[in-house]
Image: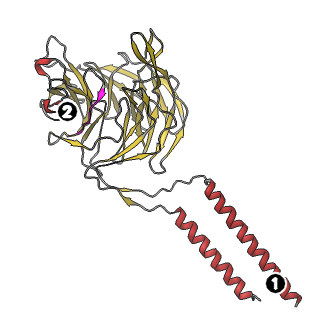
Amino acid sequence: MLNKNKIVSFLLIFLFISSTFITIRNTVSASELVDDLWSTKTPMSQARADLGVVAVDGKIYAIGGYTAIGHEWWGTYPTNYTNTNERYDPATNMWTTLEPMPTSRANFAIIAYQSKIYCIGGESIDKPGNYNKYCIVEVYDTVTNSWSTKNDIPFDGLDIQVNIVNGKIFAISGYDLFMYDSMADKWTKKTSVPLPDDLYNGFGIVCDFTIVLDNKIMVYFRYTYALLMGKGKVMIYDNTANVWSEGKPQTTGIYGKFNQVPYGISVSVADSCITTGTYAPKKVYVWGLLTAGSDKPTLSNWAYDPVEDTWLIVKNMSTYRAQFGVAVVNDIIYVVGGKDVEDAIFFSINEQYVPKGYTGTISPDTTPTAPTSNSNTLIIGIVIIVAIAVVTTGILITKKKQK
């Protein structure tokens, strides 16, 4: 026969084991990250290409894009443009669907400033021959989960490069430079990029990517005509003086002929990003290099050190694709979405790259989440066991009183 002390001891042991199990189940400790490594994270809910991807306050937003390909006698074309807006939290490895963008489109410029995301320009094709180029500026407020419309851009809305310098948005369209003041909701024309002296009749270079270094915009151009094939030009914009200067010509890395396939054919950059130097060395990463004329991704990805003026090859993406988006959180790089250019397969994939030389850790996940089905089963089991223990205790106490 169990006495009162044994019953109390049983209950204390049971509660201790249960609380210990629950604590172990819910504790996520910080752990070291392995550098120069790709890993696959939770994918988006919708596969799409040519989307806008940007990081705000430690979270990644994936907006817009297109999801299908149309076929006509003259070739293929993008279709089914979307306004989907999803947010990825690296701490929980989960996506959340948010208020959609007002205008469904792709190939727009995207940039974040003060918890707001600016989606600038873009395009859509409703049907063959009905091609829409947009000059709209739609802004998403990440705090209120709402959209607003700002003044249109005074330039072509395609192939725009955007950067933030001293609280202002700078957009490069072709060789023209414009500045946007978000407080005044006003676009102002600035000094255009001067054409290089060795340019052939004003043609033959395209803008591959831009970065901001020491509050100056560095624009990397690629030559496209045969006489200067394999060479890159760097132009540097000083916002304070509103003047351009020429940087050192690029002849190595993605601009070197040893990397071109086949010989003499230059490559362009699908997307790029820059690490801050806080957790990983400050470098510019260029992803999804495309062989000119074929739009087929090459097998090489590169990193550029703008201070040392050196290039190095970095580990290839796990999934080769084009028209994806890139964002950086705590110097960890995320490559999201895209499509296979040959088979028209669209991806919802989300791949994470830890740069070489990374020194940070994964922070513990402190965000509360809803219980899973397994968690519900565990809770129900605990409740049943406690109920049985209470009933058993009552029966034993009653029998003892009867005696």
Instruction: Report the front residue among 322 and 383.
Output: 322
Mark 2, secondary structure of its residue: helix
**Which corner quadrant holds the C terminus?**
bottom right
Is 233 part of what is drawn in magenta?
A: no
Is 299 part of what is drawn in magenta?
A: yes
Separation of residues labelled 1 and 2 (CA atoms): 82 Å
Residue 99, placed above or below residue 74: below
Residue 204, placed above or below residue 288: above
Question: Quick check: marks 1 and 2 in contact, CB under 8 Å?
Answer: no
Q: Residue at x 28, y 22 (%)?
A: 294
**Which corner quadrant holds the N terminus?**
bottom right
Place residue 382 in its image quadrant. Answer: bottom right
**First along the sequence among labels 1 and 2:** 2
Q: Position of residue 187 (x, y in %)?
A: 36, 21
Q: Residue at x 44, y 46 (%)?
A: 41
- Magenta span of residues: 296-302
Q: Residues within 10 Å of mark 2 (few under 14, many from 20)?
A: many
Instruction: Report the front residue among 349 and 365.
Output: 349
Display colour scheme? secondary structure
Residue 379 appears in the figure:
yes
Mark 1: amino acid: Ile
Q: Is residue 391 left or right of residue 222?
A: right
Mark 1, secondary structure of its residue: helix
Residue 247 appears in the figure:
no
Place residue 111 in its image quadrant. Answer: top left
Q: Position of residue 158 (x, y in %)?
A: 36, 19
What number is the disc on residue 397? 1
What number is the disc on residue 254? 2
Mark 2: amino acid: Ile
Instruction: Report the front residue among 281 and 335.
Output: 335
Q: Residues within 10 Å of mark 1 (few under 14, many from 20)?
A: some
